[in-house]
Image (spheres, rainbow, N blue to C red):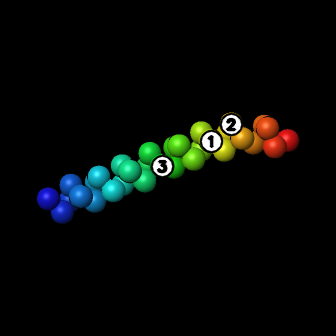
Amino acid sequence: MFKWRIKKEKLKSDLEDRCSWLVSSKVAPLKR
């Protein structure tokens, strides 16, 4: 159960990282 919880948290953070990367990649050209 504990391992699964950590796995879930990691997955969540990975998704957030990907989302923020996608957003920054879309916003970066606009800032230029």
Say which residue label 2 marks. 26
Apparent side of residue 18 relative to residue 4 in the rendered image (left or right)? right
Expressed as whole percent of the image width and height from the top left, the position of residue 19 reads 53, 43
Could you tell me how far apart the alpha carbons at marks 3 and 2 are, in whole angstroms? 15 Å
Say which residue label 3 marks. 16
Expressed as whole percent of the image width and height from the top left, the position of residue 18 reads 51, 43
Could you tell me how far apart the alpha carbons at marks 1 and 2 are, in whole angstroms? 5 Å
Label 1 sits on a secondary structure element that is helix
Type of amino acid under label 1? Val
Quadrant housing the N terminus: bottom left
Type of amino acid under label 2? Lys
Which residue: 59% across, 44% down? 21
Say which residue label 1 marks. 23
Apparent side of residue 4 relative to residue 13 in the rendered image (left or right)? left
Quadrant housing the C terminus: top right
Marks 1,2: beta carbons within 8 A: yes
